[in-house]
Image (cartoon, coloured by chain):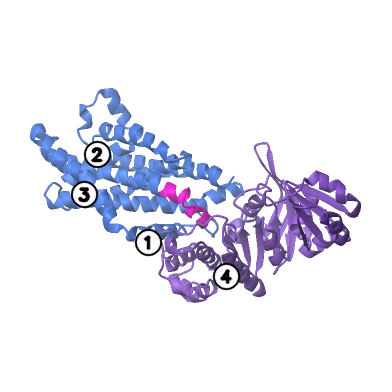
Chain colours: A purple, B blue
Amino acid sequence: MKTIDLSGVSKTYGDKVVVDGLSFSVAPGECFGLLGPNGAGKSTIARMVLGMTSPDAGKITVLGVPVPARARLARRGIGVVPQFDNLDPEFTVRENLLVYGRYFGMSTRQIKAVMPSLLEFARLESKVDARVSELSGGMKRRLTLARALINDPQLLVMDEPTTGLDPHARHLIWERLRSLLARGKTIILTTHFMEEAERLCDRLCVLERGRNIAEGRPHVLIDELIGCEVIEIYGGNPHELESLIKPYADRIEVSGETLFCYAPDPEQVRGRLRERAGLRVLQRPPNLEDVFLRLTGREMEK
Amino acid sequence: MGDGSAAALPANAWNWIAVWQRNYLAWKKVALASILGNLADPMIYLFGLGLGLGLVVGRVDGTSYIAFLAGGMVATSAMTSATFETIYAAFARMNAQRTWEGILYTQLTLGDIILGELAWAASKAFLAGTGIMIVATMLGYAAWPSVLYALPVIVLTGFAFASLAMVVTALAPSYDYFIFYQTLVLTPMLFLCGAVFPITQLPHAFQQVAQFLPLAHAIDLIRPAMLGRQADSMGLHVGALCIYAVLPFFVSAALFRRRLMS
């Protein structure tokens, strides 16, 4: 049985189509990513999986029950890390966990029994009695993650789990999420960070304007759609450069002042550019950013 | 009944308690300041108007003015504390703090949250109303033990005004709109419902309007209890307050569903 199953799901606000005939499914134990720029419909999909928003058309099943019809039942087995922190700022770390556990009908004794392992997981043992307002951004996210685990959920729904964190805090969250996957949890996360999607997701779906424009394993998508090294070139007139290197490239994309060149033999391209002064040339392996650029003709994180 | 209405209604009879407990825990941290803040205003009115104006007014309705005013102030303080808790504190939890959002991700429904907030606002109304009643009783302005009959009425009054305020909270785009509710609804009610002077002093048309206002029903129950008299048409007053507690609850649930879950 699939943990999440969406088929033909659409959602319109006014005359704006936010989700457009979307289908995908997530298997147990999998980390599934919804990757797309702001406004692609990622958060709306996350809300629909939780039963917070009803689709106009299509069917959603989560943990074996229809959503939103029986969303309350589904949510018993779901932990949520929302895009914006909604911890209780006036409460301590301990109180936040206590209060949240009660929303799942847990007794104080049950909550106190699971608290030490949650605090250890979130690396917040020394902050038990600190108020949320005293915590750093990374600590708050970890507390939100610990809070999401209080009901021992099978499925975690995470909306932009590391947005707004510094790189160190982000890596710590990624490491924690991997340990959850190792424990057999299923994760669905939305992100606009390519690196996050590549590192964490077993499979992902690339979204643009609510449509699924590509789906698969990150590396398979990269190999299939790009399949060669990428040369990024800045510092010149991109259109002039384009005609210069065109004969040696499979494909060239221009985004802003950057030129992305996909060439089977990068050395040839570099050779052509060597005589040009003032250019910055960077050769790197292909990534999901290139996939998105290929599919949509624009960059994601801009 | 679709899935939608189920999400807006309480899922069971006890889920709301977790919301109440959350608010209680937050309140405990600032309890003293909150109690003083809630009691100061009606106390100042009670003594300022009761003693000051009482000198000029003399006896009202067969009792001293301050004893007459005490019943009005108990009902009014229940009204204002339930209202303010809902339009300011609950609005913050629904809007800027995103507390409700966090709760909606658990097995609680929107209806559970609203019910928990109403029960909490009614608890604060109880605290404020009872505080004034205790002071009035100790100073001999209220009759013991019949004053005890006022206790459940204070809770019901709290529920009625919290429920009404919940509709305002569901509709308000921001804090700025609450001032209209305060100045156009609550303040006129204070003068139309016999809180500070007998309703019989009003022109007939206003007396007719007052019959429909929840504060008038609250006062008609609380004041006799505090003066040791038998209340008239108790069933009517209790029924009216119950309607004010229940109907707006459903209206606000439907409005919040549209606002938060569309």
Query: What's the amino acid at mark 2?
Result: Asp
Answer yes or no: do the residues labelled 1 and 4 have beta carbons within 8 Å?
no
The location of residue A231, given as percent across then percent down, is 80, 57
Work out whether residue B28 or residue B229 is closer to the camera in this orientation and state it.
Answer: B28
State whether residue B232 appears in this view. Answer: yes
Alpha carbon distance from label 1 to label 3: 24 Å
Chain for numbered disc 4? A
Q: Secondary structure at mark 2?
A: loop
Which residue is labeled 3 in the image? Answer: B132
Alpha carbon distance from label 2 to label 1: 39 Å
Which residue is labeled 2 in the image? Answer: B232
Which residue is labeled 4 in the image? Answer: A152
The mark lying in front, picked from 2 and 3, is: 3
Answer yes or no: do the residues labelled 1 and 3 have beta carbons within 8 Å?
no
Instruction: Please give the range of residues in magenta.
Output: B90-104
Which residue is labeled 1 in the image? Answer: B25
The location of residue A95, given as percent across then percent down, is 42, 66
Query: What's the amino acid at mark 3?
Result: Ile
